Amino acid sequence: MSAIADVARLAGVAKATASRALSGRGYVSEETRLKVVAAATMIGYVASPNAASLVTGRTQSVGVIIPFISRWFFAEILESIEQALLARGYDMTLYNLPAPSEERERVFDFFLARKRFDGVISVGVELADSEVQLLHRLGRPLVGIGGEIPGVHTIAIDDIAAARLATEHLLSLGHTDIRHIGGDQIDQMDFAVHTKRLTGFTHAMHAAGLPTDGCFSPCAFTVPGGYDVGLALFGDPHQRPTAVFAASDEIAIGLIIAARELGIQVPSELSVIGIDGHPCAEMFRLTTIEQHPRNQARMAVESLLAALEPAAEPVAAGLTRAPTNLVMRSSTSAPR
């Protein structure tokens, strides 16, 4: 069986250099790394993760906890986390974390506590203080995505600012009859995303001196959710607004489909803007606030892996704002 010494000899480097090149831990030049990888491939060398773990005390594995897998935002985050970890030689174990329940307790008390991970990334989950303290006691670096968690470094967009910008875009075009279609205020997502986006809308309307009573309609964060509300709202010409700020691109796409079915022209009769940067937004020519979930995932992985470097400082608690940007397409224009 080939050994690391054989790889090093064939590549013409020291054993320690070959080990760093194959494990991804420690610096080697790209030229040297490629030479070592080619040598390992040539002789069929495969590093033993168990042996590496005994030497380094690391498992090269990261635990990821997430509330949803099938929804677009979370799927984008997951795929990008996996790609970023694999590029650095790390594996990923995924836990679909339910709401507070016995099942959720088992995830923390058994899987995350007893299985060996080098660190944990929490995506869209508002962790309880006891859950954070458990991971801290285990010495596992923890990074979150989605909103503020006390004692944890987290990455998130400013939902209030993004919603305000979306509404201000409609106001700048001359719209005054604007409706917000967003998530149910009772059935909240973690980190109160529904409320924050409604708050941003309200702030922008009030700053423009416009009322907001009766200007909000709740729906599911899905294309069908937007479609159903759109049919009900746009079907009555007496209550139809000239513009809508949708709390997600999927809601906005559902609204556009409903408008088309009712013979309402977008944007000449109805302007629509969303938040997300969904891949289908361009196809529907949807104006949107892009939040770049893949960038948020890369930021989280970089923060976590930086804390795993030798002699690294613990991950500093606090919130890092992920950037967003307005992308203008043809779903918005000045009112008729």
Image: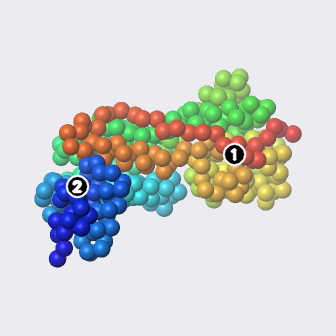
Q: Amino acid at mark 1?
A: Thr
Q: Quadrant of the C terminus?
A: top right
Front position in the image: 261 or 29: 29
- Residue with the most extreme right position: 336
Q: Amino acid at mark 2?
A: Thr
- The residue at the point 70 percent across, 49 percent down is 286
Q: Under tag 1, what secondary structure?
A: strand
- The residue at the point 83 percent across, 38 percent down is 335
Image position of 134 with respect to 204: above or below: below
Front position in the image: 221 or 119: 119
Front position in the image: 19 or 97: 19
Lateral position of residue 239 relative to residue 10, left or right: right
Lateral position of residue 224 relative to residue 89, left or right: right
Q: Quadrant of the N terminus?
A: bottom left
- Residue with the most extreme front position: 12
Q: Under tag 2, what secondary structure?
A: helix
- Using a 10 Å C-alpha cutoff, classify the residue at mark 2 as few (fewer than 14 neighbours), some (14 to 19) or many (20 or more): many
What is the quadrant of residue 306 in the picture?
top left
Q: Position of residue 271 (x, y in %)?
A: 76, 44
Front position in the image: 113 or 182: 113
Q: Which residue is mark 1?
A: 287
Q: Is residue 74 visible?
A: no
Looking at the rendered image, the disc whose residue lies closer to the viewer, 1 or 2, is: 2
Q: Position of residue 238 (x, y in %)?
A: 82, 43
- Residue with the most extreme bottom position: 1
Q: Position of residue 326 (x, y in %)?
A: 64, 39
Q: Which residue is mark 2?
A: 17
